[in-house]
Amino acid sequence: MHGYAAGPGDGTAAAPGGLLDLLQVAAVVLDGEGHVVLWSPEAEQLLGYLADEALDRRADKLLVSPENRQRARDLFAQVRSGAGWAGVFPLRHRDGTEVPVEFRTMRLRDRQGATHLLGLAADATTVRRVERDLALSHSLVRQTPVGIAVFDTDLRWVSVNPALERMNGVPEEQVLGRRIREVLPELEVEVIESRMRHVLVTGKPLLDQMTIGRTPGHPEERAFSESYHRIEDTHGRVLGLAVAIIDVTERQNAATEVSEARERLSVIADAGARIGT
């Protein structure tokens, strides 16, 4: 996405942060006999063992309780054969407690043809929590009647929820990677993009901002209330911004009618006073 992983020069380098940091994914490499040959700092955080304590040790004897060792050896043989394995397996922490660990495993070969096994692991409880949070967020965004758009730092669409698709009258796949002016030129584009840039720079939300315009979904002129929020990762890196949009045309029309009625009543009252005088 434009602006999401911009690095110096070619735009391919990503700054630290994001989902992998949140999950604290650990990497462990075993040799063909099951000895630990590589041990990442995240593995130390997950299981408590320093690299010096883990390297060259048999993983099953160090990390697996006696009642689970045969299962661990069977899975090791399965992965060593090239079949691979993914799932949750309990490992023994340095403090003696058991940690449910979510695994993705694969067989590796070095230049001499020797077999190694790579295990990517994360705390299963954390993985389940992140999955629930993502599922809840996805469900809320897809089902809410409020239009929601996500833009990158170049002000290009990253996602659009169904409510906004209906407001715009344009499916999501036709807006992704494009600027507002390319898709909805009959909106107040300069005003909208000026607000977006302000929020990206300052980080301060803009709430209930009014916009008047037309979209393919509503050829007649409509009034929209928009709220802008900057999106940052856990390290404060700016990823883009989210915009929540509500069609407030009926509310605006009702307010206009009330204002006009008040004005008429004022005229009538003034006229009545003059006539009385």
Image (cartoon, helix red, strand yellow):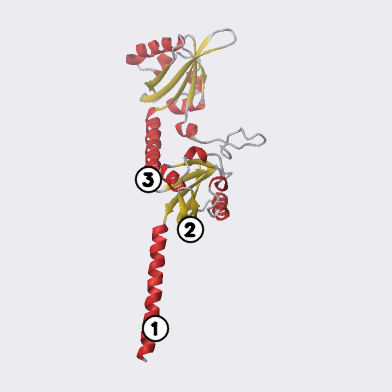
Q: Secondary structure at mark 3?
A: loop
| Label 3: few (<14), some (14–19) or many (≥20) C-alpha neighbours in 10 Å | few
Residue 93 falls in image quadrant: top left
Q: Quadrant of residue 78?
A: top left
Q: Is residue 72 left or right of residue 4?
A: left
- Return the residue at label 3: 144
Relative placement, left or right, of 197 versus 227 is: right
Outermost residue, right side: 9
Q: Which residue is mark 1?
A: 270
**Discs 2, 3 touching: Cβ within 8 Å:** no
Sequence order check: which comes first, mark 2 or mark 1?
Answer: 2
Q: Percent from the top left, x then y, of residue 270?
A: 39, 83
- 60 displayed left or right of 157: left
C-alpha distance separating marks 3 and 1: 47 Å
Say whether residue 249 is left or right of residue 195: left
Give yes or no for contact between labels 3 and 1 (Cβ–Cβ under 8 Å). Answer: no
Residue 120 percent coordinates (x, y): 47, 22
Say if residue 274 shows up in the picture: yes
- Residue drawn at point x = 37 percent, y = 77 percent: 265
Q: Which residue was labeled with disc 2?
A: 210
Which residue is painted at 38% across and 73% down in the image?
262
Q: What is the x, y in percent for residue 114?
A: 54, 8
Mark 2 or 3 closer to N-term?
3
Q: Which quarter of the figure is the C terminus placed in? A: bottom left
235 or 58: nearer the viewer: 235
* Picture residue at 39% right of the left edge, 88% below the top: 274
